[in-house]
């Protein structure tokens, strides 16, 4: 088998076109994707409400990687590689829980919640526990949303966050909780799942329910009148005006823009009716939805009464776990303040659509007759993803 020249393959991509077939079919590219792209990108791993107490932890896995996110005794949050510094076993086998220490199941090396090695039995003289703590990753908490980057030098995220924070502050996302999360396993390369989320070219043809309420499905529907009416209502509801679009080299991509739902829709619901109590400090339903991207892999949609988070987690070359997470304000009570089936209806049916179209996309791309075609003007988000992805080189 000939080795893949990743740099040459990247250079061979025709600008304005989809990526060539090997990007979705070659094991060497998948290895590159995890090692050089995912491991150097900011990844949304969870929310602070998952780890409220000292000792609370959860793990987050992608590809062959696993991270432990833990709250230490002083209330600090840390992220660590879930790889023992002895002979490499997974240290933490649970998805979540509360622990005093992390003890490796193999030979019982024991780590503090801060990742420091507390104890290793029968080690030779000169062994220094201080040099054998769990490897730490960079971590940022943004309004309760936890982002992790395992690169030595992560892409700049702080300057973009400084711009985005005031726009999302009124939602008070730090005071939300997870109402529900669902996974949709799709037999496709993770890039096809990300690409699908990056464009709404498919929303009209593929998402009947979504297209009924969301003007973003077609630029022709997002009229000046609809946008101005939204802006007036958003101001009245207490949301600052403005949007952010940053796609700078060496920095995390940032996008934040509120767009109108169609008249009569307060939220992403079947009937247009509200689904849950207003988020944060909002004074009214404005009939808008904020598309928020913090790093290109991490996407959120914020309605006036709930937020939906999306991630597209590689599990193998052609398998991806789509994870959809619904947030409501933390004092909302299921069954009283919101109905879980109503809350999750839209993005459940929409995710089932996405699972289907992404699967068929991979099937076609697997064909030796696949020739990457030109992107539509409505697929500018895919170009932004490609710019970011193609800029990362193999070592
Ligand atoms: Fe963890 Fe040996 S591999 S203690
Ligand atoms: Fe979709």
Image (cartoon, grey):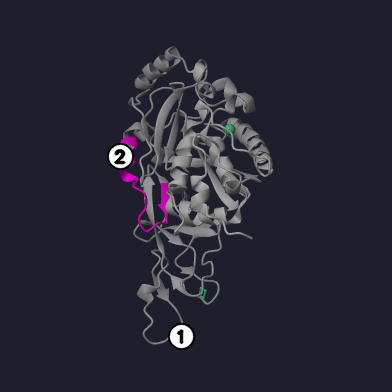
**Which secondary structure, mark 1?**
loop
Determine whether 146 is above or below 113 in the image: above
Position of residue 163 measured from the top left corner of the image (x, y, whole percent): 31, 36
Tell me what residue is drawn at x 47 percent, y 29 percent: 303
Which mark lies nearer to you, 2 or 1?
2
In which image quadrant can residue 145 be found? top left
Residue 128 place in picture, x, y as percent: 36, 79
Visible in this render: residue 106? Answer: yes
Along the line of sight, which residue is nearer the eye, 17 or 224?
Answer: 17
Horizontally, residue 346 falls left or right of residue 134, namely: right
Q: Is residue 115 left or right of residue 309?
A: left
162 within the magenta span: yes
User: Residue 118 location, x and y as percent?
Assistant: 40, 74
Residue 362 in the image: above or below residue 275: below
Q: Can you tell which mark lies on residue 386?
A: none
Which residue is identified by label 2? Answer: 162
Q: CA distance from mark 2 to mark 1?
A: 49 Å
Q: Is 359 situated above or below 55? A: above
Q: Residue furthest bottom?
A: 125
**Ligand 2 located in image quadrant:** top right
Residue 122: mark in rendering = 1
Marks counted in the figure total 2
Where is residue 30? Give x, y as percent: 56, 53
Camera-nearest residue between 142 and 256: 256
Q: Nearer the viewer, residue 21 or 243?
A: 21
Mark toward the start of the polypeptide (2 vs 1): 1
Considering the image in quadrants, where does the N terminus appear?
bottom right
The range drawn in magenta is 146-164
Is 36 contained in the magenta span? no
């Amino acid at each position: 088998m000939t080795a893949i020249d990743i740099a040459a393959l990247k250079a061979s991509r025709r600008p304005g076109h989809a990526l060539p077939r090997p990007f979705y079919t070659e094991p060497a590219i998948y290895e590159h994707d995890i090692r050089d792209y995912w491991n150097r990108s900011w990844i949304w791993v969870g929310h602070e409400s998952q780890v409220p107490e000292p000792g609370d932890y959860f793990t987050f896995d992608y590809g062959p990687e696993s991270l432990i996110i833990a709250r230490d005794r002083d209330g600090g949050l840390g992220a660590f590689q879930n790889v023992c510094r002895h002979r490499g076993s997974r240290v933490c086998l649970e998805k979540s829980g509360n622990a005093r220490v992390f003890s490796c199941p193999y030979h019982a090396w024991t780590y503090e919640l801060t990742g420091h090695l507390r104890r290793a039995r029968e080690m030779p003289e000169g062994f220094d526990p201080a040099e054998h703590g769990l490897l730490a990753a960079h971590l940022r908490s943004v309004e309760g949303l936890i982002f992790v980057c395992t690169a030595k030098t992560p892409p700049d995220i702080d300057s973009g966050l400084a711009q985005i924070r005031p726009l999302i502050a009124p939602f008070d996302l730090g005071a939300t909780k997870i109402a529900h999360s669902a996974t949709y396993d799709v037999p496709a390369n993770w890039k096809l799942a990300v690409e699908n989320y990056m464009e709404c070219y498919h929303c009209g043809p593929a998402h009947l329910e979504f297209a009924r309420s969301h003007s973003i499905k077609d630029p022709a529907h997002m009229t000046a009148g609809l946008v101005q009416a939204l802006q007036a209502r958003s101001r009245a509801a207490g949301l600052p005006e403005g949007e952010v679009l940053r796609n700078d080299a060496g920095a995390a991509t940032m996008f934040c823009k509120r767009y109108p739902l169609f008249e009569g829709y307060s939220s992403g619901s079947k009937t247009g009716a509200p689904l849950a109590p207003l988020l944060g400090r909002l004074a009214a339903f404005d009939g808008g939805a904020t598309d928020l991207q913090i790093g290109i892999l991490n996407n959120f949609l914020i309605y006036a009464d709930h937020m939906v988070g999306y991630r597209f987690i590689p599990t193998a070359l052609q398998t991806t776990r789509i994870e959809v997470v619904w947030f409501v304000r933390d004092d909302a009570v299921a069954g009283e303040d919101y109905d879980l089936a109503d809350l999750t209806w839209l993005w459940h049916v929409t995710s089932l659509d996405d699972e289907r179209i992404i699967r068929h996309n991979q099937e076609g791309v697997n064909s030796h007759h696949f020739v990457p075609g030109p992107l539509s003007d409505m697929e500018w988000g895919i170009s932004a993803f490609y710019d970011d992805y193609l800029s990362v080189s193999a070592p």
